[in-house]
Amino acid sequence: MAFLEISGLRKRFGALEILKGIDLELEKGGFLVLVGPSGCGKSTLLNTIAGLEAITAGEILVDGRPIGDLHPSKRDIAMVFQSYALYPNMTVAGNMSFGMEMRGVPAEERKAAIDKVAKVLQISHLLDRKPSQLSGGQRQRVAMGRALVRDPKLFLFDEPLSNLDAKLRVDMRVEIKRLHQATGTTIVYVTHDQIEAMTLATKIAVMRDGEVQQFGTPAEIYNNPANLFVADFMGSPAMNLLQATIERGDNGSVVALDRPEGAPLKLPVGTAKGALDAYVGKPVVFGIRPEALTDPDGADRNARNVSEHACLIDVVEPAGSDTFAITKLGRKEVVARLRADASIVPGQTAQLAFNLDKAVYFDPSTQLRIA
Ligand SMILES: Nc1ncnc2c1ncn2[C@@H]1O[C@H](COP(=O)(O)OP(=O)(O)OP(=O)(O)O)[C@@H](O)[C@H]1O
Ligand SMILES: [Mg+2]
């Protein structure tokens, strides 16, 4: 049995159903990341687990025990809120110590826990300050520290790094990963940050309008998105999603993409995508991530089905470690990710390699992935 089990969870505010039957489970020591557009119900879901919101229907089990009827203080869950509140008249150390004092943790143990966590969060030099003397990012780290000094069954984090600058955010992400690996705690974590989701999660749940669109490992969600919403939502820059048609070619099915000039581009779908045979003569949405569309020398050498074609390059965007190139296919702008030193000039054609092992195909009417 999973450590955290959520089944058929519904939450209504008045007539409005905000969570519409959520099923999720997380193994002990797992790291579940919730992602989804603003307002889809991520914080509400965390709040129901913490016990701050009563549930309308369904069940939440932690370690085999239903917690729905337990008072929040009895759930042994630590939460860092999206909008956290520190005690203004207490120092940073006092804020972190308070919960432990309430639970009767001896002073020496409290100090050791605070010192350890403060070091991880890079706030050791702030322990004697009051919250009003801290920056937003520092306050956010204190709020996190307050949760981390505990040893609860479950940690809930609601966008804990959202107020931090880019550099500190990366540092903290690595620290959270290290902490999770070292302590094996079980975590449910909300973020808008794609990299955080991919690097921290053992499981990701992509939510939309109070429903889970897909629940799986980061690799499953990234490589095999269940539908167009997930494909479009996960990944930055986003997956190219192009109108296309499946046709019968001499050696199996091909996917045909309109081009602004000349005949449509035809790419072999490959034998692994047999489900597409049923779509011959029909429209599909062809999905290819920018990194699967590269300069030929940058293409994955282990890929079986790589197809090279000359494409007219509209825009070139050097981004330091990579260069992004924009071309037009399937009546849309398509982003290709090239090596930084790839020789490429806007307004001229360049040879691009399509890694079709990594391509995905969707039914435009059901929005579901076909292959
Ligand atoms: N107490 C409440 N009463 C009525 N509606 C609420 C209440 N709390 C939240 N909602 C609504 O529920 C929906 C989900 O809100 P929630 O805060 O869970 O979204 P979220 O996914 O965390 O969004 P964000 O990414 O912006 O933080 C929103 O439409 C919100 O307006
Ligand atoms: Mg929220």
Image (cartoon, rainbow, N blue to C red):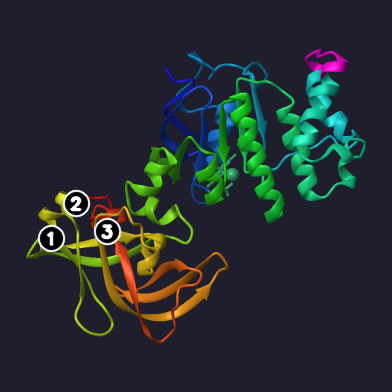
At a point 80% along the width and 37% down the height, the residue shown is 86
Q: Earlier in the sequence, mark 1 or mark 3?
A: 1
Q: Earlier in the sequence, mark 1 or mark 2?
A: 1
Q: Quadrant of ligand 1?
A: top right
> Residue 200 appears at what percent x and percent y?
55, 40
Q: As shown in the figure, which amino acid type bears the numbered disc 2?
A: Lys
Asked which quadrant contains residue 293, the reply is bottom left
Q: Name the residue beneath numbered marker 1.
A: 253
Magenta segment? 102-109
Q: Is residue 162 above or below residue 180?
A: below
Asked which quadrant contains residue 284, the reply is bottom left
Q: As shown in the figure, which amino acid type bears the numbered disc 3?
A: Leu
Residue 198 shown left or right of residue 334 in the figure: right
At a point 27% along the width and 50% down the height, the residue shown is 368
Q: Name the residue beneath numbered marker 2.
A: 273
Q: Earlier in the sequence, mark 3 or mark 2?
A: 2
Q: Does the residue at mark 1 contact the one at mark 2 (Cβ under 8 Å)?
A: yes
